[in-house]
Amino acid sequence: MKLSVGHLYPELFNLYGDRGNVQCLLKRLQWRGIEADVIPLPAGEKVDFAGLDIICWGGGSDRGQEIAAGHLKAIRADFQSYVEDGGVVLAVCAAYQLLGNYYRTEKRTIEGLGILDICTEWKTERLVGNVVLESPSFPSLIVGFENHAGRTEIGDYMPFGKVLFGHGNTGNDGYEGLIHKNLIATYLHGPLLPKNPEVCDWLLERALRRRYGREIALEPLPDVQEHRANRNIVERFTDCRKKTDASCLGKSL
Ligand code: GLN
């Protein structure tokens, strides 16, 4: 078995070590004896979506987004077909915004791919800090770090998580990111996957199912360090401080 992970525009989008997500995907496959390769997809080059099982796209500056926007039209149709066909995607922050219709900053409007019917508006006050989320899709709480000026309205999409601590999509709607088919879009850096191994495995299981046309259960991993890192953030920033807190049972404590 083998999966190919496409790393989109790695030269423009690697805020807060987002490329660690790619490393995490590879490592968790290798630990289970599954082969994996990484295909860097630099801006301006042709992308063979049929050969990809997971696309990882990280966060970046407004300037990086402007540069990328000039290359998006060329990949738009194939990227959209990939997503609608269940292709697996992890898009962080700037990438999340670029999957939508536009990101309007104080100076200009950066046109996005329009694969997600969402819009992002810039505001002076940045939303910065640690984040803790709760999601019915994952048994553990999700932790990460956000730093964005954009506010994203997600309409009817399913959120990635409910904000227990932090700001999330708009700073006031109580939700963070979104899930559409096998795509997760989120503001969470960290990088996200090493501290949230269940999110990593969610992506891997979907990619394996799509490539091989059947359920492939991933061997469980001990994840001792991973859960310790996750719990450290949860305990610092939420009320889930005591192991006995009933509302936190089953949530990584
Ligand atoms: N430039 C975007 C914003 O500030 C995205 C930032 C990021 O990727 N962290 O909203």
Image: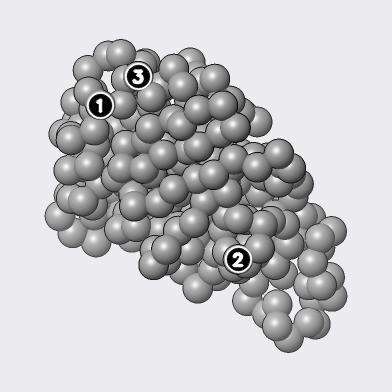
Density class for disc 2 (Cα within 10 Å; few <14, some 14-19, many ≥20) is few
Density class for disc 3 (Cα within 10 Å; few <14, some 14-19, many ≥20) is some
Disc 3 and disc 2: Cα gap in Å?
A: 31 Å
Residue 76 locus on image (x, y percent): 24, 33
Residue 155 locus on image (x, y percent): 42, 63
Q: Which residue is mark 2?
A: 173
Name the residue nearer the viewer: 103 or 108: 108
Per the rendering, the mark at residue 70 is 3
Residue 38 locus on image (x, y percent): 37, 25
Q: Residue furthest front?
A: 107
Identify the mark nearer the N-term, 3 or 2: 3
Q: Residue furthest bottom?
A: 246
Disc 2 and disc 1: Cα gap in Å?
A: 31 Å
Give me the residue at 48% from left, 16% from top: 11
Name the residue nearer the viewer: 132 or 67: 67
Name the secondary structure under disc 2. Answer: loop
Q: How many marks?
A: 3
Quarter of the figure with the C terminus? bottom right
Give me the residue at 48% from left, 38% from top: 103
Q: Which residue is mark 1?
A: 73
The amino acid type, in three-letter code, at marker 3 is Gly
Disc 1 and disc 3: Cα gap in Å?
A: 7 Å
Identify the mark nearer the N-term, 2 or 1: 1
